[in-house]
Image (cartoon, rainbow, N blue to C red):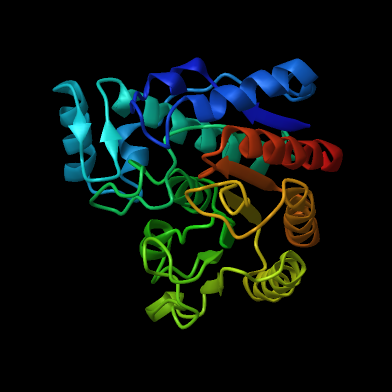
Amino acid sequence: MTLLYYDSIFQEHETGDHPESGWRILAVVRHLQFLGLDSSCERPAWDPATIDELCYVHTREYVESIRQFAAEGGGNLDDDTVVSEKSFEVARKAVGAVGDAVRRVVAGKASNAFCLVRPPGHHAMPDRAMGFCLFNNVAIAARIATHELALRRVLIIDIDVHHGNGTQAIFWEDADVGYFSIHRASFYPGTGASDEIGAGKGLGTTFNLPIEFGTSRESLMRTFEIGISQFAEHIRPQLVLVSAGFDAHKADTNGSLGLESEDYKRLTRCLLEIAQRHCDGKLVSVLEGGYNRYSLTESVDYHLHELLDAS
């Protein structure tokens, strides 16, 4: 069984005329409903993340600052990141979805899960928002897996066109969580060079695969498949988490590495093969980027079909 997480509350993180706005996932939801794909999945109810869960990766002072900023009506935290009155509660609900998915998948109640949530998370640092992101959904879920569920090895695979600098920073010295990112080279946020491999106890648990713009789709795919296969053998994960950005699509003006929608079918199959090889298929995928409503909808369609087929 594949779990699908979506709630209308995600429309209440109001960002105005911004690339990361509610229409992104509303278009996807309508498409999944039209095809009946949503009814092919299990749709759990879940609770928002607690403050203590947010503090698995964020400072308590930062969490409180976002709560207070939203309560005062919100505004712009920086040039990229918007907060509205409901954003704190919406972000807690998004984190809660990913945490709930991890608990259910690890317990064997489902094979995999897709969390169609917003705001995204992989740029969020322990003490500040960045790049449309308030709380680091995937990082908190990884800490739930290691702190609450006693997993010793978790692998985060980030396929967003932008490097997940927040996720990397959080686990830079962490031996329990491996972080793999394929992303556009020399692009926002300016991190993710191939020589960034972690430090201390986390030395060797970070693997960055920057891809030059103009690289052929086939070359990109083969490079990804070889790189992630080798890194997964090193990590030997008990759970795979996916930062599922779809903004490497050629139609995405906020990113692009020339991918077509159907390429996400092959990417997803590779992710599932990694999960099947190492952890009986236990995989939780979480939406990050994807800002063209048409390419995002098509790409998520391919992604979810593969998750359903695997379950």
Give residue 242's position: percent from left, percent from top: 60, 51
Which residue lies most toward the bottom here?
195
Q: Residue furthest right?
A: 309
Quarter where residue 102 is shown: top right
State the quadrant of the N terminus.
Answer: top right
Residue 187: horizontal and vertical position, in percent?
43, 65
Depth check: give the residue in front, 246 or 106. Answer: 246
User: Is residue 104 visible from the viewing direction of this image?
Assistant: no
In this orientation, does residue 225 appear?
Answer: yes
* Residue 27, image quadrant: top right
Q: Nearer the viewer, residue 195 or 212?
A: 212
Nearer to me, 93 or 279: 93
For the C terminus, give its image quadrant: top right
- Up the image or down, 233 lies above or below 182; here it is below
- The residue nearer to you, when weighing 217 against 268, is 217
Decide if residue 26 is on the left or right side of residue 104: left
Q: Position of residue 292 (x, y in %)?
A: 56, 38
Residue at 74%, 51% in the rendered image: 268
The quarter of the displayed image where residue 257 is located: bottom right
Name the residue located 78 percent from the left edge and 47 percent from the top edge.
262
